[in-house]
Amino acid sequence: MDVYGLNDALPFVEPALSPGAYDPIAEPLSGSDFLDSLASCLAGGGWASIDAFEFLTPPLVTELAREVTLWHRGDRLRAAGVGRGLTLQQDRSVRCDKVAWLNGQTPPQARLFDRIEDIRQGLNERLFLGLRRFEAHYAIYEPGDFYRRHMDSFAGRASRIVSLVLYLNENWQPEDGGKLQLFNRDLPGSVGATVAPEAGRLVVFMSEEIPHEVLIANRTRYSLACWFRCDDEMPLALND
Ligand code: OGA
Ligand code: MN
């Protein structure tokens, strides 16, 4: 398992272990090692990039990739919005991805939700974040799509606390673009890390602390985003 995020002063971080290098025969890392690494990265620089095949299992990543591809072909994703509630807008100069919210009811989603629940509880035990629930969607960026620099939540709103993105693209190449840039929490003008959206890679960061941006994708880019929240379920119209 490669973990980044302990030293967010690094100008660029490219995970070195390609998911293809996963050895299914090797002893898998226990969930608690994974959660320890994740928690210490979040407590340190506020973000982590982890190749998480051991934690999620390769078949699960493949099944999620297959599902989002089918949903894309079936035209089940819709233009994402910016803002919340009644001010929700579709501003394609800020973001142009398409999303579909997940309910955890297909077999791969049910297995994924179990793992996400492990992460929720594991982070609460280690960092006392008071994460009460999560919400998740698939996202698709078609060639030319991007998401300009933004934060997932703003301090004081006390809603989205931790963001998680799982990438679902095999053999992502440098010329495919679409990297995630995470800005340095304490020096917001400088890039803390640049992460390629390779299948099985998880990026996790503090929603109110880390500005980030999705660079223009040159190839269809599939991912799954999830936010851990510290509030209770709200009526749909008031939700983010
Ligand atoms: C988001 C987001 C990052 C990514 O959906 O809010 O920032 O790499 N996604 O897809
Ligand atoms: Mn974001």
Image (cartoon, rainbow, N blue to C red):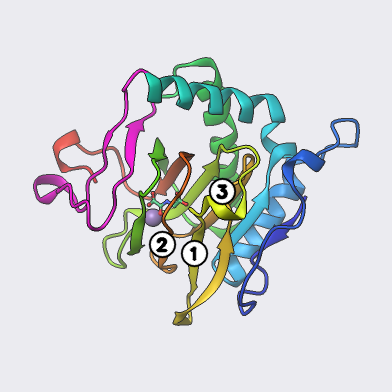
- Spatial separation of the CA atoms under disc 2 and disc 3: 13 Å
Instruction: Decide: few, some or many residues near mark 3? Use Cα within 10 Å; few <14, some 14-19, many ≥20.
Output: many
Residue 90 magenta-drawn? yes
Residue 179 image position (x, y, % from top left): 51, 56
Instruction: Give the magenta-colored segment's residue range.
Output: 74-102
Instruction: Decide: few, some or many residues near mark 1? Use Cα within 10 Å; few <14, some 14-19, many ≥20.
Output: many
Q: Along the polypeptide, which appears first: circle 2 or circle 1? A: 1
Residue 200 image position (x, y, % from top left): 64, 40
Principal SS element in the magenta part?
loop
203 and 116: which is toward the camera: 203
Q: Label 3: state its secondary structure.
A: loop
Is the residue under label 1 in contact with that under label 2 (CB below 8 Å)? yes
Q: Is residue 152 visible?
A: no
Q: Is the residue at mark 2 in contact range of ligand 1, meaning its CB lies under 8 Å from it? A: yes
Q: Along the polypeptide, which appears first: circle 3 or circle 1? A: 1
152 and 18: which is toward the camera: 18
Q: Is the residue at mark 3 in contact range of ligand 1, meaning its CB lies under 8 Å from it? A: yes
Residue 53 image position (x, y, % from top left): 71, 38
Residue 197 badge: 3
Q: At label 1, which amino acid type do we have?
A: Gln
Q: Is residue 224 visible?
A: yes
Q: Residue at x 53, y 50 (%)?
A: 176
Quarter residue 15 falls in: bottom right
Name the residue carrying label 1.
181
Name the residue carrying label 2.
213
Quarter residue 8 falls in: bottom right
- Left or right, residue 39 beside residue 204: right
